[in-house]
Image: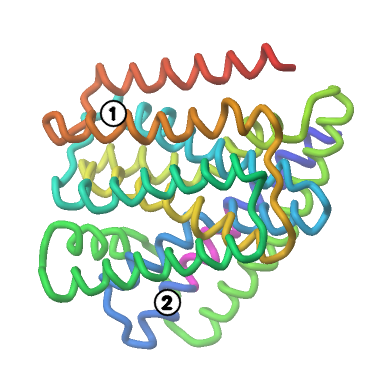
Amino acid sequence: MEILFLTAGLALLILSGEFALRGAIGLARRANISTAVIGLTVMGFGTSAPELVVTIQAVLTGSADIAVGNAIGSNIANTLLILGAGALIRPLSCDPRAVRRDGTVMILSAALLCVWGLMGGIVVWQGVLMLALLVAFMWWSYQLDTRHRDKASDLHEEMAEETSGIPRSAVSIAVYILGGFAGLAYGAALLVESAVVIAEAAGVSQSIIGLTLVAFGTSLPELAATLVAAYRRHTDIAIANVLGSNIFNILGVLGTGALFGPLGFSDHIVTVDQWVMLGTAVILLPILISGWRVCRAEGALLLTGYAVYIGSLTIRL
């Protein structure tokens, strides 16, 4: 029964996240916000909405291990599973300037999280700092987008324009946003509660459930977006989406979660998983730089890495 509740929670998170994202884009367009800004901010938050709501719910219910495991596991899945699967469909090309900017910030964010892990976790002041860094990054990106019309700014616009079914009237926008966030809240509650019960019944730690089941589930929107982008030959959008999501998962999701309560790191996350997350980020950059694409062979290598990582987690069960 708990597996059914967990599946229902995941499905509700994904559908509600899409609803809230479309409503937010519709609201931004009615407010005459530029497409580039919508792509940079709304799309970034929208694809990470499931992780954000799950993190808040986990912290409020005293399951911080799920919150931390979810964010770290999602970033690992984004890099190894999602880009690997997308590259098997079609080699994923990328723009050098976009990769240098967003890829560098992704690695620095992952490194910062590892520092927090060594310090014992994330408390309020660290969360505020992470959110401030996120705002600074967004402002810096916005300034670059408006001053220099480069490929990175074009990518931000394409990410917003790719989303279909955007509501236009004020009433429909309100329904999308309110309904989306209500569904996100209820879906997160179902997911976290069922994950805790499953962990207790199976005798495994909540952090492992967060790193696997919860992380995979909340990464499904990015997986779907990447596969669709690869199929439509918009592969640069797929890579930009993953890089942006990894940045938001660390600075935005965990930064916000720390405002609701301290985020402690389990011993194994401190000694293994956070370094796997940083390692995948560091490995990804040279893959992207060598030819500015992820070819099928590299995609298969990334997928193999994810299979090995998940296999290593089963040893800890």
Q: Amino acid at mark 2?
A: Gly
Q: For the residue labelled by badge 1, is the local secondary structure a helix, a strand or a loop?
A: helix
> Where in the figure is residue 43, as x and y percent of width and height?
40, 62
Q: Residue at x 19, y 64 (%)?
A: 153
Q: Seen in the image, is 83 located left or right of residue 234?
A: right
Q: Main secondary structure of the magenta part?
A: helix
12 vs 85, nearest the viewer: 85
For marks 1 and 2, give the CA distance: 31 Å
Q: Is residue 32 left or right of residue 116?
A: left
| Picture quarter with the N terminus | top right
Residue 280 picture location, percent across and down: 40, 30
Q: Could you tell me which residue is drawn at 19 percent across and 58 percent down?
A: 152
Q: Is residue 21 magenta?
A: yes
Q: Amino acid at mark 1?
A: Ala
Q: In the image, what residue occupies the spot 22% across and 74% down?
A: 143
Q: For residue 296, what is the image quadrant?
A: top left
Residue 146: give x, y in percent of width and height.
17, 75
State the residue position of label 1: 87
